[in-house]
Image (spheres, rainbow, N blue to C red):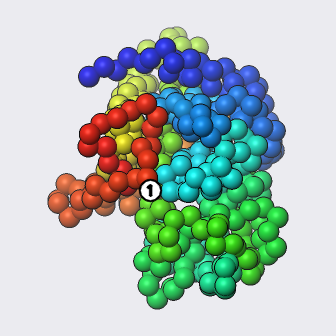
Amino acid sequence: MDFSLTDEQLQVRDMVREFAQREVAPHIREWDAKTEFHRDVLDKMGEAGILGLPIPEDYGGLGLDYVSLALACEELEYVDTFLRVIMSVHVGLNSLSLWQWATEEQKQRWLAPQATGEKIATFALTEPNAGSDAGSIESTVVKDGDSYILNGAKMWISLADVADHILVFASTDRSQKHRALSAFMVERGMDGLSSGSIKGKLGVRAGSTGELAFNNVRLPVENRIGEEGEGFKIAMSCIDQGRFTVAAGAVGLTRAALDASVKYANERETFGVPIGKHQLVQQMIAKMVAGEEASRLLVMKAADRKNYGVRNTKETSLAKWYACDAALQAADDAVQVHGSYGFSNEYPVERFLRNARGAVIYEGTREVHTLLQAEYALGYREDRPLRCPQPPAVGFEREEALVH
């Protein structure tokens, strides 16, 4: 097994690293403290090609593989989680889902402008009363001639206030639970669509999080993604993509916590020596090293399967669960290494800790992933090899290429 990166992958990593360090790193402490979201960052990411990394060139993207996407997410979250969240919702949950499920006409209409950053996209599944239990979604759509009427509300939606395209899931018959879910693209400016921001978050304070309301929003039938009743299957495949970006980003947060801790441990002295000389500090540093390395290997295993179009629900779930827990532990230990200084925003580790906590909840809670992995091990869960309309990665072919 070859773990070396190609020249192209290294170039992507270095480009995204330089972008995040130049455009965001000098400002993130202030933005986080003031809970400011800067919309122009999205435009700059689009101009740099970051928002279209894994999208084929035919649709305005760069046509790169999933290892490149993972490296990009790692570098973005190294600076701040809000940057990786943009990749998760715009690229992972929306654009890659259009690539997999949309018609050619829909791809030209929505995916192409998203790949270049001309239009911003998000994903709307979670509701005030429905999160992990997608079958309890209360939003409804009713067929009315050649269109649908959408009503309902969504909660905890990243980029809710700025997204131009919103991938929304609603039910045609709530008594059928997940079997009646369908997916629709809602566009900014449609009558009956409104949005608002959520303030007072524990972490990701420099990011945009909000709520959406749909009051008799009329959707042409052409805005339906997939067939009626395919919404749950589409949503789960979307979440596989989102979980992958979250896992990759968590590697970056663990690395950031490690780097900050190593720097501080070599500078801060107690009892006449740098604190890095104390074995219990070394123990915390060593755990961060192990967490980073193990998390990256799990992410790269999932990336390899995704590159070949092989279904990767199990691998992506494990990577997301482990990497997010490792990042939370690393951030917590980093605060401990910094002592009292770790409790203030003079150092970045308190922000790392606040940001890391959210990822253990979204894109499948720790408990959901625990159950998934146990069910796979016990033989209670088995992935069915279903083919996708087209392979999910450019330039890779394998006879058994299978996806969600």
What residue is at 47 percent from the left and 79 percent from the top?
Answer: 180
The kind of secondary structure element at disc 1 is: helix
Residue at left 46%, top 69%? 230
Identified at 62% across, 55% down, the residue is 105
Q: Is residue 181 above or below residue 54?
A: below
Q: Quadrant of residue 307?
A: top left
Residue beneath label 1, please?
Answer: 237
Relative side of 32 to 241, left or right: right
Residue 217 image offset from top left, x and y in percent: 74, 76
250, 267: nearer the viewer: 250
Is residue 146 found left or right of 304 in the rendered image? right
Rendered position, 375 above or below 243? below
| Image quarter of residue 297 | top left
The residue lying furthest to the bottom in this view is: 175
**How far across and how far down the image is residue 84, in percent?**
60, 40
What is the three-letter code of the residue carrying label 1? Answer: Ser
